Image (cartoon, rainbow, N blue to C red):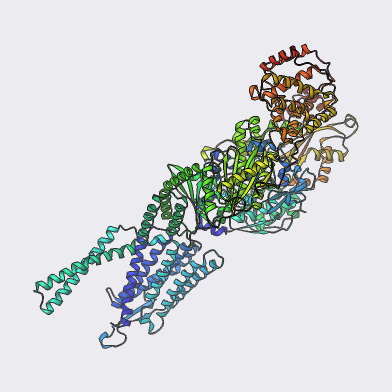
Amino acid sequence: MPEQKLKNTKQDAMWDEYCGFLSLSTNEYMDIQRRLLSEQLALYCDCELGRRMLNGKRPASVSEFRSASALTTYGDYDDILLQHVESALPQKPAAWIETPWKGGNRPVKVIPHTQSMLDNFSRLLVALFLNLSVLTNRRVTLKQPEDITGIAPPALLTGLMPYLLNEGLPVRYTCRCPSINGLSAQQRSAEGIRLGMTRNPGVVLGSSGALAGMSSLFWSENAGDSTLPELLKTTFFPNYRFFKAVKKRRQHGCAVRPRDIWQPRGLISMGSDAGHLKKKIEDVWGMRPLELFATAETGGIAMEPAAGDGLCFLPDAGFYEFLPMDELEKSLLDPSYRPKTYLMDELIAGRSYELVFSSFKGGVFSRCRLGEVFRCVALTDEENGILFPQFFHVGKTPDVIDITDYFSFTESTINDAIRLSNLDILDWFAVKEYDAHRNAGMHLYVEIGSQTVISGAVTPQVLHEHLSIYFRYLDTDYPQLKQLTGCDPMRITILPTGTVRAYIGITGCALRRMNPSRHEVTDILRMAFGESEEAL
Amino acid sequence: MNLAQLFYWGLPTTALVIYFVLLASITFSEKTKASIAYLPMLVCLIAWMTACVFTQLEAFPGCLFWARTQLLAIVCTLYSMYVFCCVFTRLMFLRRLLYWLVPLAGFAALSYTDLVLRDVRVVKGANPLSGDFPPFPSVTYDLGPLAAPMFILLGLFVLHSLAVMLRHARKNDIPPRKVLLLSAGLFALCVGLLFNLVPGAANYPYDILSGLVCALLYFSALYRENASITRFSLPRSLVLSAFTLIMTFAVLCVVCLIRAVLSAFGALDSLIILGFLTFLLILVIRPVLNLFIRFADTVFYKNELHREQCLSGFTQSIANSLDLPFINRRLAEVISELCGTQKVHLMLHDEKAGNYYTLRSGVQLQDPRLYLKRDNPIIAWLAGNPGCLTQEELARRPQMRALWDDERRLISENNIRVFVPVRSGGRLIGILLLSEKKTGAEYDKQDFELLMGLSDAAGAAIDNARLYRHVQQDAQTDGLTGLFNHRFFSKYLLEQLTQPGRLPVSAIMLDLDNFKLYNDLYGHIQGDIALKQIAEIMTRVVGEKGVCARYGGEEFIVILPLCDSNKAFGFAEDIRTEVRRQFGRNDTASYGFLTVSAGICTYPYTASNRDELISRADNALYYAKGGGKDQSVIFTSESDLKILKVGFDSSPQYLTTVYALTAAIDAKDHFTLGHSQNVARYANALVSELKLAPYSGTVIQHAALLHDVGKIGIPESILSKPGRLTAEEYGFIKQHVEMSVKIAKHLPAVDNVISAIIGHHERWDGKGYPQGASGEQIDILSRCLCIADVFDALTAFRPYKQPMTQEAALKVIEENSGTMFDPQLVAIFIRLVRQGKISTQVTPSGR
C-alpha cells in the first residue's frame, strides 16, 4: 500500500527511512557491513555453492572470510546459476535476472535475486526518487501516482525496476513490449522514443549512452538541412511536438535535442560512462541527471544524492571490497596473482579501484569481480553531511572497452574479427578514448605485415571497413553504435611494422593489448612517429 | 411540562451542555490535526443550534436574521464535516474542498438575501396548562427561488462525501470502522435535515437531535483514534474549587428551602429545631462533599488515578521482592492493564554471552527464538539513547539496516511494537518488548512516559533479583563447569527420593578415563577446558530430564527422576558416545584420550536408600573402569554386575601385543630392526640409575619398545630413502610420534606409556615436536627415551651414514646437552656408558 504509506508518513520520516543511510558515519557504515556479512556467511556456509566458494570453511569474521574465499568472477558460478540449481543456493530466489554475457561462455548470464535483495533495490529506487524530488524542487512529486511505461520485460533488470519502484511509490506500470530480446539497440531506443512521443514522460530513466546520444537519433550531425531526421525514416511517426522542435531547430540552426521535445520532471542515468556523460546529458536534456549504479549481478547498490557529487553505496546491499588499480594491473598480467583488496574505511581519496562484491541477504556472490572501476572522489563530504566515501564510476576494467551499454570490445572479440578478416595484422593494441563530445570509442593500433604493406592496399579506412564488417558479424548491436553515440566507435592507426616488438625489447615488459597505460601508448607512438604532435 | 415540551426545550439545553463539554475536552486535551479539525464543526453545530433556538424565541434582531444564520450554519457545518473527514482519514484530497468551496460560499452569502429565504413566521405555542397542541412555537419559512438549488447542491455535496469515503473504504485505504462512524454521522445529519421538510415534523427540533448524534459519532471516532482527548489537563484543585462553589450554591438553596418550610409552619423562631436542622446539615455536607470529590475524580481523572494506583501498587509489590519471575509477571500485568498491551516480554542481559534472552513467564506463551544478539543494533541504540524505540523507528533509523532478516521477521511475527530499556545504575540490564495493543491503537507519548517510569521502577528491583539469583546460583553451582555442586545435588536427591510421584530415580556416576594423563600431557588449563566441555555435553544430553552435578574432581553425577535403569543407560551411552565423538574427531594426538565410564543404579529397584544409590552407582563405575573403561555398566546386584556395553576387548594380553607391534615395525623397516630393543635397554639402565618410582622401569621398557610403532603408518619409500629427506617427507616422518600415541592409547593396560612416547622427540630448548615443550615440561621418561633413541641412532648403521663409535656418539650427545637433551641426564648417561653399564650393540637402524 505505497499510497497509504505516503499519506501516513511525513516527508522527513520518509527521508530518514530511505535516505537516512547518507548520514551514517564510516564506523556505523562498517558496523552494518560487518553484521550483514555475518548474516550472509551463516546462510552461505550451509549451501553447496557457499561450501565450494569458501572451501568448506566457516569464517566467523571479515578477515577470515577474506582469507577463506578467493576472488571470483561470474564464470565460477555459471555451472550452478545457468542451470538454475536452486537447491545449491543460500536462499530460494524470488527472481532470476538475465543480462547479456559479452565475452562469456554463453549468450546470457542469469543471476538469482532473493526477496530481500529486491526489497533493498526497491528502497534504493525510492531513495533516488526522493533525491530527485529534492533536486527538482519537488517537481517530481511522490504523492501522486506516476504512470510508467517501459519496453523491457521483468526478466531484465530495467524491466524489473518499475515493479520494484511500485513497492515503495504509487506507480502504474505498463509494459508495452512483451520482449525486447529480438530488437537491436537502435530499435530499443526508437521504441523508447516512440513511447515517449505518445505522452510527456515525468521521469526518464535510461542508460547514459542512450540518453546522451538521443540527439543523434533525431538528427544526424553530418546530414544537411534537407535530410529527413534519421529516425523518421524508419521507426518514428510524425508528432506535433517533434515538428515544433524541428521548426525551432531550423530557426536557430542547431540540432534537435530531447529538451526541445520533452520537459521531463526528472532524469536518472545508469550504466556505462554515466559519470563521463553527465555533462552531455545535462546539455541535451536541460537538467542534471541523478546517477544510479545497478547491475544484474548486484541489483541496485549505489546512487547519487541530490546534495553531493558522487555515488554513495548502500551499506546493506552488499559487502564491498576495493582492488587498487596497481593490483588490478598485476592480476591482469599474471592471472595467478592474488591481489590485495581494501575495505570502505581503508580507501584513499582520488584513487581508482575495481569493485569486488559479495552478496548479502542470501545472494550468491562471494568476492566477485564485476569488472567495474570506481574512483573514490572523497572520503567524506561534510558540507552535505555525508561521512563515508563517495565514488565516480570510471567504467569497466582495462580488459574491456565498452561503448555505451550495448557493445564491448574485448581481446577475444578483436582477435576474432582480425582472424575472420584474414588481414595481415601482426600485432595490435586497443585503447578506449573519448572525443570532444565525451563520446567513447576504441582506438585500435595495428601493425601490418611488411609484405602486405608493400603489395597490398592498406589504409586505416580499408582496415576499418574490413574489421567493421566482422564486428557487425560478431555482434548485431555494432552497426547501431554510430547511430546511438553520434560518433564512429572505432578509429584505426597503423604503426610501423615491428614497433611493438621493439618497444617490448627495450622495456623488457609485456605490453597489455587492451588499454595499456597512457605512458606506454605515448612511448610507443613516440618510437613509431617521433615527436610529431599530430601522432601523439 | 409534558414530554413534547421536555423534548422541545430540553433537547437544545442538553445539546448545548454536551457541545460545551466536548468543546472543553478538545480544547484542554492534547491537540492533533483531527481534533483541531473537529473544533470548527463543533462551533458550527453550536451556532446552528443557537440560531434555531433564537429563531423560535424571536430574539433580537429578529427571527428572519436568525433563520438565515441557521442556513449559513448548516452550510458551514456540512463543509466543516467534510474537512474533518479529509483530515481524519488522511486520504481524501483537500484540493476537492476548493472546488466545493466556491458554490457553497456563494449560496451561504445568498442566504442573507430574499433569493433563498424571504420571510419567517413564528406562531406562539399554546398555554401548556390548557393542553392545546403544539405547546411551543412553530416556525413557518417562506423560501425564495434559490432555496431548492441550494438544497440540491448540499445534497450532492453530502453524496459526494459519502461516495469518496466508501470508495476509499472499498480500496482498503481507510479502515471500514472509521468509515462506518463517519458515514453514520453524515447520514444522521442528512436525515435530521430532511425531517425539516416534512410538514408537522418540522415543528420538532429533529435537526438539533441529528446534529448532536453526528457530533457524538464523530467524537467517538476521534476518541477511538486518540484516547487522550478526554484527558483534561485542568489542575485538580481548580476542578475541586468549582465543585465547592456548586456545593455552596446547593447549601444556600437548602437553607432557603428550610427557611421557607419553617416559616410556613411558624417554627422559624424555635432554636431547638434550628439547631437540630443545622446539625443535620453539617452531618450531611461532609459525605456529600466527599461524594462530589469522588465524582470529579471519576469523571475527570479516572485514568490518571487508575495509573497512579497501579503504579503505586506495582512499586510496593516489587520493592521487597527478589523473585524475578514474580517481578516479570507483575510488570507484564501492570503494562497490560495500563497500556492495553497484548503481550509483554522481558529480556535480560546474559553476562557470559552478552546477548539478551527472554525471561520465561508462566503467564503467556513465548517464542523461544526471541532473543537479541549482543551486536544487535537495537541494543546499541537503547544503550545509547534515553527513550523507547518503536517499530516505526526501526524502519527510520539507518543503523537498523544492520538487522538480520530473521530478526526483522521475528519482531514482526511477535508483533513487537515498542522496545523499552530497563536500566540499573546506568547499565542496560534488560529490555521490555511490547506487542501491539488489544485495541490496535498506537502507543502515544503518555504511554511512553508511563513505560519509562515503570522500567525505571522495575530496573533496580530486577537488578537486585538478578544479583540474588546469581548469588543463589553461585552457592549451588560449581564455578568451573557451571554444573550443580555436591551440596545442591545432595539436597536435590533427597527431595526426589522423598517427594511422592518422582520414583524411580536413577543415578549415573561418571568418571573421566585417563584424565590425570590428559592433565599431565596438556596441562591443567586444557584439563579444565575438557571438564567444561564434558559438562556442556552432559547438560545438553540430559536437558530438563534431570540434574547434572560435579561430584568431585573428574567425577560427575546425574540424577534422573522418573527414569528407570534402561532409560538411564540410554542417557549414559549418549554422553559417552558424544564425549568420544567430540574428543576423537581431531587427527592430532591431543584428542581421543578422554573417554568416560559410567555406573548406573536405580532407586528403589537396586538401592533402598540414598547412600546405597550413590555407593552402588559408584561400584558399577569401578566395574566399568576395571573392565576396560569407556563403557556404561548398570548395577544389578552386589555379586552380579551386568556389563551391558564394553568398548573393546579388555583381555590383558598386552605384553604379547607390545612385542607383536615391535615385530611389525621391525618388519616394516629393516633398518630399525633391533632399534626398539636397544633403546629399551639404554633407557631402562638410565631410569634405574635415576631411582624413580618402582614401576618406571616397566613403563620405560614398554615405551621404548613402542616409541616408533607409529612408523607403521609411514610409507616405506620414505623410511628407506637413502638420500636426504625433503621437507614434505620430513613432515611425514614427524607424524610417527602422534601415530605411536594413537596406537598405544588403544592398549588400556599400557596407556601410561603415552606420556613417555609423546615427548621422545621434544627438545630441552623447546624446538622439538610435536608440542614444542621445553625443560621440565617434558616428562622425565621422555627425556630418557630421547637420549637413548639418539644414542642408538648415532651408533647404528643408516642408509645414509656409517655407524659412529661410542665415544663419537657420546661427544655428540654432550655437545647437545642443554639444547637437545636434559644436561643432568646427559651427565648420568655418559657416566653409565663409560662405566660399561650401557654397552652398544651395533644394529642396522632407522631414522
Residue at point 40%, 72% (across, down): B213
The count of marks equals 0
Which quadrant is home to the C terminus of chain A?
Answer: top right
List x then y, in percent, for residue B610.
55, 48
Q: Which x, y percent locates residue A8?
A: 51, 57
Residue A37 seen from this side: no
Name the residue nearer the viewer: B486 or B26: B486
Q: Quadrant of the N terminus of chain A?
A: bottom right
Residue situated furthest left in the rendering: B269
Q: Residue at x 57, y 41 (%)?
A: B551
Q: Nearer the viewer, residue B136 or B694?
A: B694
Q: Quadrant of residue A491?
A: top right
- Residue B58 in picture, x, y percent from top left: 28, 77
B305 displayed left or right of B672: left
Is B572 on the left-hand or right-hand side of B108?
right
Q: Position of residue A5 (x, y in %)?
A: 54, 57
**Would you say residue B63 is visible in this rendering?**
yes
The residue closer to the viewer here, B323 or B197, is B323
